[in-house]
Amino acid sequence: MSAKALVEVRDLRLHFPVRSGLLRRETARVMAVDGVTFDIAEGETLGLVGESGCGKSSTGRAVLRLAKPTSGEVRFDGEDLGALSASRLRQRRRHMQMIFQSPFASLNPRLSVGGAIREPLDIHSLGTPAEREARVAELLSLVGLEPGAAQRYPHEFSGGQRQRIGIARALATSPRFVVADEPLSALDVSIRAQVVNLMRDLKERLGLTYLFIAHDLALVRHMSDRVAVMYLGRIVELAPCDDLFDRPLHPYTKALLSAIPTPDPEVEQGRHRIVLTGEVPSPTNPPSGCRFRTRCPIATARCAEEEPQLRDLGTPGAPHQVACHLA
C-alpha cells in the first residue's frame, strides 16, 4: 500500500465457547473470526462484505477491542492494542469509534440527544462544560440537525435522524478511525443515500479512515476504496473496489456480484445469475480445506484437502488477493 497503514490486522481470531450440561463445560467453539489479515491506510475506506453470520461485525468489534480477540494482533498507528494497559487503551479509544447498526437500540432513551453526544466528551474529560455544549451544537450542525435537537430525546426522531445522532456521537472525540457496522441496514431505502453521502462528506472534511461493514454491494461500491469479501470467518478476496467489481476472481464473490440487479431491462435480461446451493456450514464445524467448497460449483478434490491462502493476482500497485486454488 502506498499510504501509511493506520490499522494493521494480523491473523485475527475471535472464538466464542459453546457450553452445555450441568457443569457448563465447553463442548464446542464458534469460530466467528478465524485468521483475518488486512491493512487500512490512513484516509482510506475498506468495505467488508459477506452473508449474514460470516463474521463481519465480530471483526469490527474485535478490531476496536469491544470484544477481546482470542488471538492475533491489531495495531493502530503502529501500537499493538493488545499490549496496552487499561489506562493507555482508554486513551487510545478516543481515536477509534464505532457507528452501530441500529439507531433505535444504540441510543439510550433516558438520555437527551445532547447528553448522548456529550457523554464521550465527559468520559475523556475533553474541554470545559461550556466547550462541551458548544461541541454538541457543532456536531449536530455537522450532521445536518438543528442545535435545538440537543434538548430532545431519541424517540422524537426518525430512524435516519437517529443515525445522524449516532454519527455525531461517534465523531465527538475527533477520532481518526471509525468502524461503521452496517449503519444503513436499519434505515429506509429512501434515506440510505442521504446518510452514505453524509459519511463520504465527513470523511473528506475530517480526514477519517473507515472500516465500512455492509450487505448492500451497491453502497459498498459507492463508499469504498478497497473491498474485502468474507465467508465463514475468513477473507476470501481483497482488492481495489473497481477491480473487484469488474474482475471478481473468487467463485463466492462472483455469486454475490451476480445477485446485484441492474436498472437497464436489456442488461438485466441477459444477466447470468449464479445461484448457490446448500446452506452455509456451521462456524463450529467448518469444512476441511476451502470453507466454500461445499457450495462451490467448481470445487475439486484438492479443495477438500488443502486450505487456500490469500495470494496476489493483481497488477503492480493494485494488489488483488484471492484465496482460491482455481483462481
Image (tube, rainbow, N blue to C red):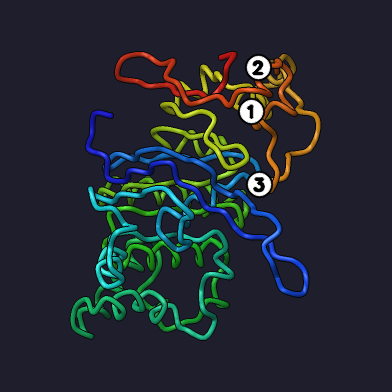
Under mark 1, the amino acid is Gly
- The residue beneath circle 3 is 52
Circle 3 Cα neighbour tier, 10 Å, few/some/many (<14 / 14–19 / ≥20): few
Residue at (57, 17) in percent of width and height: 325
Q: Quadrant of residue 302?
A: top right
Residue at (63, 60) in percent of width and height: 17
Q: Is residue 277 above or below residue 159?
A: above
Question: Disc 3 on helix, strand or loop?
Answer: loop
Which quadrant is the N terminus positioned in? top left
Q: Is residue 323 above or below residue 222?
A: above
- Between marks 2 and 3, how big is the CA–CA gap? 27 Å
- The residue beneath circle 2 is 302
Name the spot of residue 86 as percent of width and height, x first. 31, 71
> Is tag 1's residue or tag 3's residue first in the polypeptide sequence?
3
Proximity of marks 1 and 2: CB atoms separated by less than 8 Å: yes
Name the spot of residue 95 as percent of width and height, x first. 28, 60
- The residue beneath circle 1 is 289
In the image, taking residue 75 as reference, residue 24 lies left or right, namely right
> Is tag 1's residue or tag 2's residue first in the polypeptide sequence?
1
Which one is closest to the eye, mark 1 or mark 3? 1
- Between marks 1 and 2, how big is the CA–CA gap? 8 Å
Which quadrant is the C terminus positioned in? top right
Under mark 3, the amino acid is Ser
Name the spot of residue 19 as percent of width and height, x first. 70, 65
In the image, taking residue 183 as reference, residue 265 lies left or right, namely right
Which one is closest to the eye, mark 2 or mark 3? 2
